[in-house]
Image (cartoon, grey):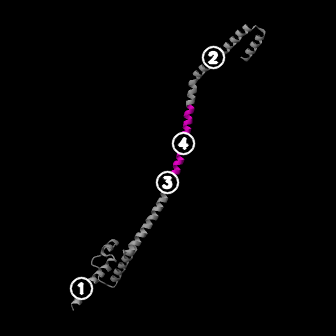
Amino acid sequence: MVKKLQKMAEKKAAAPAGLLDSQLAQTVKDSAQQIWLAGLGAFAKAQGEGGKVFDTLIKEGVSLQRKTQAAAEEKLGDVAGRMSAMAGEVGSKANAQWDKLESIFEERTARALGRLGVPSAKDLAALVERVAALEAALAAQGGKPVAAKRNISKANLLKAAPPPAAEPARKTAARKASRKKAAPAADAA
């Protein structure tokens, strides 16, 4: 194309002005026609091979999507594993705190019950052992056997024995009542 324009420029220098203008116009028309035809050819080729290119692009897209999904699932698995580990740690810490709280509660409850005079499980166990030892000693000395063996358990001991704090209160009330009875008799004498 450039060569044609150079040839035309040389002819223009040698030929008259009107003739050169028509040749230049013809060359421009020919060049435009060739450009147009090249564009149509490219369009036809793209249209003919476009289906193949489109199918190739689809295949590449499916492959890329699979790779992306696999990578995403792997990352998701890693994150899920980390979250499970963190949840386990938090759960174990929470259990440790609950155990600590439970032991504090039990300790304080035992102290409060001790202040109220309620025997502890150790006290009851020691009492059961003492009763068993006394029964054995009595039986060894030829004492009278117990008519019916009673079930001595913590629950039975708690039901049978009044709380220690209640006994002094009853004695104090009985003393006050006897004093009141004695006071009017002293006034009458």
Q: Earlier in the sequence, mark 1 or mark 3?
A: 3
**Residue 139: x percent and y percent?**
33, 82
Q: Calculate the distance from the C-alpha at mark 4 to the C-alpha at mark 1.
A: 95 Å
Q: Nearer the viewer, mark 2 or mark 4?
A: 2
Residue holding disc 1:
181
Q: Calculate the distance from the C-alpha at mark 2 to the C-alpha at mark 1.
A: 138 Å
Res. 36 mark = 2
Residue 125 seen in the current view: no
Residue 97 seen in the current view: yes
Instruction: Give the extent of the magenta segment.
Output: 59-86
Residue holding disc 4:
72
Q: Quadrant of residue 122?
A: bottom left
What residue is rendered at 23% in x and 89% in y? 187
Q: Earlier in the sequence, mark 2 or mark 4?
A: 2
What residue is rendered at 54% in x and 41% in y? 70
Q: Calculate the distance from the C-alpha at mark 4 to the C-alpha at mark 3.
A: 22 Å
Kind of residue at badge 2: Trp
11 inside magenta stretch: no
Question: Predominant secondary structure in magenta?
Answer: helix
Q: Are marks 4 and 1 in contact (CB under 8 Å)?
A: no
**Residue 48: x percent and y percent?**
58, 21
Q: Nearer the viewer, mark 4 or mark 1?
A: 1
- SS category of the residue bearing label 3: helix
Residue holding disc 3:
87
In the rendered view of the protein, which quadrant contains the N terminus? top right
